[in-house]
Amino acid sequence: MRIEEIEFWLREQNAQKLAELYKNADLIRKENVGDAVHLRGLIEISNYCTRACAYCGLNCDQSITRYRMSHDEIIKCAKEAVEFGYGTVVLQAGEDPRVTQDFIAKIIKEIKVETDLAVTLSLGERSFDELKAWKMAGADRYLLRFETSDKKLFNLIHPADCSASSCDSTPTSSRGLTAGSRDRIAILKELKQLGYETGSGVMLGIPGQTYQSLANDIILFTKLDLDMIGIGPYIKDPNTPLGSGALAPYVNAEDQVPSGENITYKAVALTRIMRPDANIPATSALATINKANGRELALMRGANVVMPNLTPLQYRQHYTIYPDKACINETADMCKDCLAARIATIGRTIGKGQGGRK
């Protein structure tokens, strides 16, 4: 599919034509990854962050209650994932220098020794040495969303780091996190080189994002040969620079990609068509803007993964990357049962095993 065709479908509003697009994407999903929906247990291990990303409710300028989970708390959540029948745990955090190379390596090794879980990391723009050490410790996958392939827009929404003192991020030991931003596309290529299953993705509807740049993003998924692709709507947080209108001068109403569920379904379907065998989640952001059936609709339009939350409630309420996050008050048990019921209603089954890219 050429970029012009992708852009055409992103702009398409005719319900009948879109129904055909979704039907095609769902058929490609079924033929390439089957009917199983794989569950990745999410553990949000720290909400400290040295970065000032203009869209994120965890950015270092936000006045929120900060936390870091202990080694024992993380391992307890991983064992809960085993009890629930999940095949993967995802360790996610802001860019927190106190979440050190050695701390994560020890956790990975313990999970791999005591369970059959795949370990996915989502810890930001880390150094090559850290990524290599974690792969050697047994990590299977790494997620790093490039958010937009438009370099000018990326730089606008990713300003310089905060000072360490502003977010209690002074490292307790030496580590390789470089000051400022690393090139995320370069990091994704490093991850491939190191043997990780590599995941990335984008936000839809960032102020200043055009249809052409979003079409370029979908083309880039293919060029990078991504194993996992996360696509979610931008959710406005009025307490962040982006949410307060900082990029309003860069918005062209005719070319601006909207933020919402409809553009997300279109992008999920097109991504499935372009990347037939990739793992594509029905994201929490989509479930946040359509709590009734957002995940189900994404699963019926190309997605095949869901990420139930294992983070203990006392921490989960503070991982506020955007407002009114879905499942914020559900226990891990409640989340598991809810997702199982939702998956059953659309005639799909829960996947077994680690569910890597075939």
Image (tube, rainbow, N blue to C red):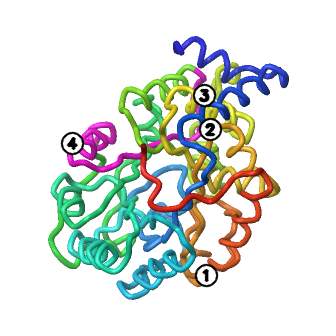
Query: Which circle's residue, 4 or 3, is located before the other in the chain?
Result: 4
Label 2, secondary structure: give it: helix
Q: Which mark is residue 30?
A: 2
Return the residue at label 4: 193
The kind of residue tagged 3 is: Leu
Query: Residue, x 54% and y 44% (percent of image)?
Result: 280
Return the residue at label 1: 313
Image position, residue 34 (x, y; %): 59, 43
Image position, residue 260 (x, y; %): 72, 41
The quadrant the C terminus occupies is top left
* Residue 146 location, quadrant: top left
| Label 4 to label 3: alpha-carbon separation | 27 Å
Query: Which circle's residue, 4 or 2, is located before the other in the chain?
Result: 2
Q: In the image, is 318 to the left or to the right of 148?
A: right
So how many labels did they put on this image? 4
Query: Which circle's residue, 2 or 3, is located before the other in the chain?
Result: 2
Q: Which mark is residue 270?
A: 3
The kind of residue tagged 1 is: Leu
Label 3, secondary structure: give it: helix
Query: Residue, x 51% and y 40% (percent of image)?
Result: 202
Q: Is residue 193 magenta?
A: yes
Can residue 98 be seen here? The reply is: no
Please determine whether, in this image, residue 24 is positioned above or below residue 241.
above
Region of the chain picked out in magenta, as a range:
183-211
| Label 4 to label 1: alpha-carbon separation | 37 Å
Q: In the image, is 303 to the left or to the right of 163?
A: right
Q: Nearer the viewer, mark 1 or mark 3?
A: 3
